[in-house]
Image (cartoon, helix red, strand yellow):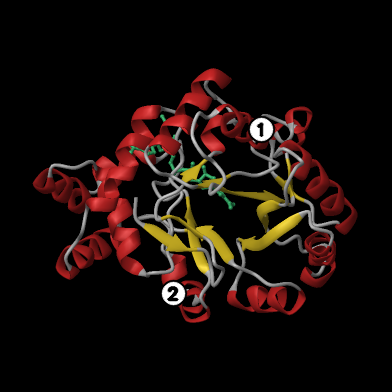
Amino acid sequence: METKQLGKTSVFVSAIGLGGMPMSIYNRPPESKSISVIHQALDLGVTFIDTADSYCKDESDKHHNERLIHQALATYKGDVSHVVVATKGGLMRPDGNWTRNGNPEHLRQTIRVSFEALGGNKPIDVWQYHSPDPNYTIEESLAPVKEAVEAGLIRFVGVSNFSVEQIQRARDVVDIVSVQNQYSPWQRQPETDGVLKYCEQEGLTFLPWSPFGGSRRHHSLQDIPAIATLAKEKGVSVYNIVLAWLRSKSPAILPIPGASQISSIEDSVRAINVKLSQEEVQKIDRATLTS
Ligand SMILES: NC(=O)c1ccc[n+]([C@@H]2O[C@H](COP(=O)([O-])OP(=O)(O)OC[C@H]3O[C@@H](n4cnc5c(N)ncnc54)[C@H](OP(=O)(O)O)[C@@H]3O)[C@@H](O)[C@H]2O)c1
């Protein structure tokens, strides 16, 4: 599997990762099945797994996805020492809804629980602030994160759903290695809001979330003719075309496609070998501006 440098660190991870969310929210599969999905991803060379404290059904089930990933890694037959798990904190799931919580005390506590949920025997590889909470300044919310880095609970820090100005403020508090914002054929804001360019210039890894539009929308990729036609011509899936399109946008990009089925991650990693010409990329660009 092709690898990519994580930010400017000495760590290299697979150029396509795995998003853990579909294995822990509504309609999730049985845990044994999810563990097989993660094991298959590892067999295929995936060494970057994205998760969050909030990938669960509701508050009573918090940290479900982190515990699942830990269990999968602990029961894997091969070497997992090079696998990077990137978790997040800063969202709550009251009654299954999503709300922000950047209260420094809450973040201090959830980092501690994430640390334990992921095994408790080494620092969290990457901890990402999930989404800025307007009730607290970025400096206030990231203060406990800096403390956790200094205390050896976190190795690297990332941010998510941040603007360029917010990333800059975060970097004044603590070293940042990655930025995770929404980027898909239906959401191309990173191309115009400066975040993708900034990541590229500053050596930050950009993790596009919901690259296929998420669990509810991914089936509609078939309905974008430019994508469906290219997939047919190349004999690959529409998912492969979207991942190749995203990867063509910037060397900073490391997609984290979600999966709850083995066939999904098996197909997604095949995108590593799919290359698009500039003309093909532009064809998708034109089609997705209007779709
Ligand atoms: N930072 C944030 O605010 C934020 C927000 C949302 C997501 N995320 C992260 O981003 C990751 C990816 O986003 P996402 O999971 O929401 O959506 P996504 O990756 O756009 O789509 C995931 C869905 O697409 C299906 N799929 C994936 N690859 C496929 C393939 N090759 N063939 C057929 N179907 C395929 C999966 O189906 P099956 O389930 O049937 O396998 C899955 O339900 C998440 O898992 C999470 O880690 C972050």
Q: Closer to the camera, 10 or 283? A: 10
Instruction: Give the residue displayed 84% in from the left and 67% down from the top.
Output: 143
Q: Position of residue 258 (x, y in %)?
A: 46, 40
CA–CA distance in space, label 2 to label 1: 32 Å
Q: Which mark is residue 142?
A: none
Which residue position holds label 2? Answer: 192
In the image, what residue type sits under mark 1? Cys
* Residue closest to the eye, 134 or 154: 154
Viewed as shown, does residue 106 lie left or right of 237?
right
Q: In the rendered image, which quarter contains the C terminus? A: bottom left
- Secondary structure category for the residue under label 1: loop
Three-letter code, disc 2: Thr
Residue 65 is drawn in which quadrant? top right
The residue nearer to you, when weighing 116 against 164, is 116
Residue topped by disc 1: 56
Other residues around mark 1 within 10 Å, as few (<14) / some (14–19) / many (≥20): many
Q: Position of residue 178 (x, y in %)?
A: 57, 65
Q: Residue at x 51, y 78 (%)?
A: 198
